[in-house]
Image: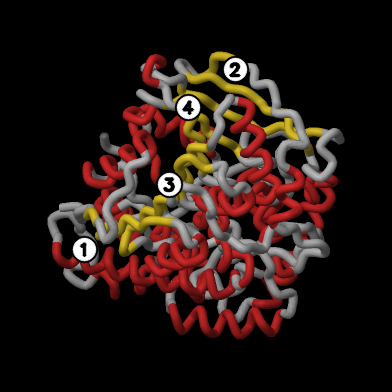
Amino acid sequence: MAFRPFRITIALLTVVVLGAGTLTARASPPTAPSTPSTAQDKRGTAEPPVLKWTPCSGTFQCAGARVPADHSAPRGPTLGVGLIKMPVRDPARRIGTLFVSTGVVGGVSFVQAAGPSLLADLNQRFDIVGIDQRGTGTSEPAMRCSTYEQDRQIEKPLVADHSGAREQFVRQARALNDLCVQRGGPLLRKLGTTEAAHDLDLLRRAVGDRQLNFLGLSYGTLLGQYYAAQYPGRVRTMVLDGVQPADLSVRDPLRLDREMFAAAEAGLKNLFDWCRRTPDSCRFGDGAPEAAFDTLVRRLDANLTTHPGRHDLVTGGVLLGEAFQALAEPALWSAFAARLSQLSAAPLPTRALPSGENAVLAGYLGNTCVDQETPPDLTVHDRHARAAAEAAPRIGRFGAYAQVKCGLWPVESAHHRGPWTHQGDTPLLVVNNTRDPYAPRAWAKKILRDTGNARLLDVRGPGHLAFGRSACVNKAVIGYLTDIRLPARGSNCSTPLPN
């Protein structure tokens, strides 16, 4: 089983938001945090939705699940959660349903694109169901903030260094947030991963499973942690691959970003080192790719001096976003090196601009901003920007004020703030690449401590996400999900660098 280009969809967790002039998004302090006891009171009070599966996209089936808009009012208004299913291939050996989540970045489209290759072995024993978290993707209503055209009116063209651009980001954040309030309306108060976890339990009941089987990828690992913490005993198996620790995400999102920036900076170094060692695969930089990359970034940003306000230019900031995305998949590094050579030869490179709704950004901001607590004090962001630039000279300066949008987010909401313990009989399986550019290994270790009941499979190698990269990882993940067979303590796998 091999899985390559579809991994990039997971990188949208950060890359899409990078491209919009933010990086990650946070929230103002909630007015009434939920607790494990209040979450438990909600369980079982709403009837599970009736799922009407209809054929879609060839061999897939699709459905929309009606769930309470507010789980504290289970008989009140509802909203829709979009689902896609790969029906089990061997019904006689069916275990149940495996829910797959990428969080707020396209669970349905991910399963549709990657499922037939990545999940084929698991599909022998499970119905595979991809989820579009409430407010995102095919879920209805979808969160709306801005169109790409409005984004370009609000935000300046991307440059590589935003470390001195606090006031620019404040103006942009207020304008975008106003649009989110105008266009998002009442939905803004109904989003967030706490509510999504309650949706997930209703979906588990709707498919008739006594316990949940779950594969969380990248941002989807947050949904898994929220569920395990709020529904003790309801988890049969749960794999978290490319993890983001919920506790750090909620309580100290600025620190979380700095640690991610540092991981990405190390990822760039890995890419440049590979480039030097494999000149036949990386035909860029004449043996000095790092210096050549920095020179190219400066030259592309300089084009804005003579062509100010042009969003269609490939600027140094746009190139940093592309580099950040390329780190997710080492198999594509050769293609990225060719892209760098192409840009170096072009006097004024341009790009096609997207149009229509920026639905991914809206769903991401709408959910993440109510989950997490970003300080509204802008001097805190100033200190963060300085620390980020020190920790990651390229990526940190690029994402310096990424948090401002959610620091100034106008909607407060109750959300789960911990604890994040998992009290089920089966430990969670945490899988993480040791040189993941988005999810440093320390985060995986933190999840082990926070949940108190998890097993780590270390995967030695670069790139984001480990499942599908090697037979060793695949065997461990499939054995755990199908037979509840944990890898031995201290087990590790490896993934090779491209030749």
N-terminal label among 3 and 2:
2
Foreground mark, 2 or 4, reads: 4
- Marks 4 & 1, CB-CB < 8 Å contact: no
Question: Hey, which residue is sitting farthest front in the picture?
Answer: 425
Q: Earlier in the sequence, mark 4 or mark 3?
A: 4
Q: Quadrant of residue 299?
A: bottom left
Q: Residue at x 85, y 33 (%)?
A: 75
> What amino acid is labelled 4 in the image?
Gly
Q: In the image, is 266 to the left or to the right of 411?
A: left
Residue at the disc numbered 1 = 275
Name the image quarter holding residue 320: bottom left
Measuring from the top left, give residue 7's x and y in whole percent.
Answer: 39, 45
Picture disc at residue 239: 3
- The numbered disc on residue 262 is none
Residue denoted by label 2: 53
**Tag in front: 2 or 1:** 2
Q: Quadrant of residue 412?
A: bottom right
Q: Are marks 4 and 3 in contact (CB under 8 Å)?
A: no
How far is the residue under mark 3 from the one under mark 2?
A: 26 Å
Of labels 3 and 1, earlier in sequence is 3
When the figure is inspected, residue 295 is found, relative to residue 108, above or below; the finding is below
Could you tell me which residue is drawn at 38 percent across and 15 percent down?
Answer: 92
Return the residue nearer the eye: 100 or 347. Answer: 100
- The residue under label 2 is which amino acid type? Trp
Q: Residues within 10 Å of mark 3 (few under 14, many from 20)?
A: many
Task: Please tell me whether mark 4 sits on a helix, a strand or a loop.
Answer: strand
